[in-house]
Image (tube, rainbow, N blue to C red):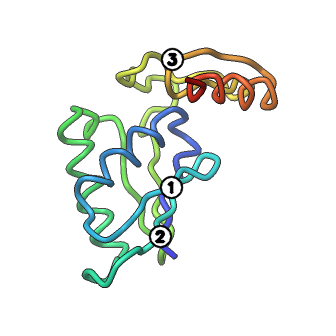
């Protein structure tokens, strides 16, 4: 199973999953913790790590992050790393949070408690 590890780039996994959705046909990208995993849903072309790397590099180029991040491929595990950990650039949704904070991908709400974030995220889906 192909995975993209975003441990060093918290907050970016949701935007990556969204970007992959439009560019990898027959594949459903899912955010699982700090990783993006892929579920093949149709009989499209086989998903390979090199195909995912190509799309990931196009995302970095489109967002002008190519200079600050590198893509490392080890088997089916793809890791997105910062070249300068203390000088990571801002993502579209603001600063990358400290490691002890959990941030809502919808509005930027931050809390040190994972349970509080899960409850908060559910509020976005109440109609």
The quadrant the C terminus occupies is top right
Task: Give the labeled residue for mark 3.
Answer: 107
Q: Measured from the top left, where is residue 35 in percent x and y?
A: 56, 53
Q: CA distance from mark 2 to mark 3?
A: 26 Å
Q: Measured from the top left, where is residue 75 in percent x and y?
A: 48, 77
Q: Mark 2 touching mark 1, by CB under 8 A? A: yes
Mark 3 vs 1, N-terminal side: 1
Q: CA distance from mark 2 to mark 1?
A: 7 Å
- Left or right of 117? Residue 109 is left
**49 and 105: which is toward the camera:** 105
Disc 1 secondary structure class: strand
Rendered image: mark on residue 39: 2
**71 and 114: which is toward the camera:** 114
Relative to 125, residue 93 above or below: above
Relative to 35, residue 49 above or below: below
Disc 2 secondary structure class: strand
Mark 2 vs 1, N-terminal side: 1
Task: Give the labeled residue for mark 1.
Answer: 30
What is the quadrant of residue 109 in the picture?
A: top right
Q: Measured from the top left, where is residue 62 in percent x and y?
A: 18, 38
Q: Measured from the top left, where is residue 33 in percent x and y?
A: 64, 47
What is the quadrant of residue 122 in the picture?
A: top right
Q: CA distance from mark 3 to mark 1?
A: 19 Å
Disc 3 secondary structure class: loop
- Classed neighbour count for the residue bearing mark 2: other residues with Cα under 10 Å, few (<14), some (14–19), many (≥20): few
Mark 2 vs 3, N-terminal side: 2
């Amino acid at each position: 199973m192909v995975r993209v590890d975003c441990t060093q780039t918290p907050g970016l996994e949701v935007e990556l999953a969204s970007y992959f959705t439009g560019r990898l046909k027959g594949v459903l990208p899912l955010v699982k913790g700090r990783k993006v995993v892929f579920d093949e849903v149709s009989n499209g072309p086989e998903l390979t790590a090199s195909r995912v790397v190509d799309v990931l590099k196009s995302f970095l180029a489109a967002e002008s992050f190519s200079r600050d991040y590198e893509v490392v491929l080890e088997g089916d595990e793809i890791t997105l790393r910062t070249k300068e950990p203390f000088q990571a650039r801002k993502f579209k949704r603001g600063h990358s949070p400290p490691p002890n904070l959990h941030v809502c991908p919808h509005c930027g709400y931050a809390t040190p408690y994972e349970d509080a974030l899960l409850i908060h995220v559910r509020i976005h889906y109440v109609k």
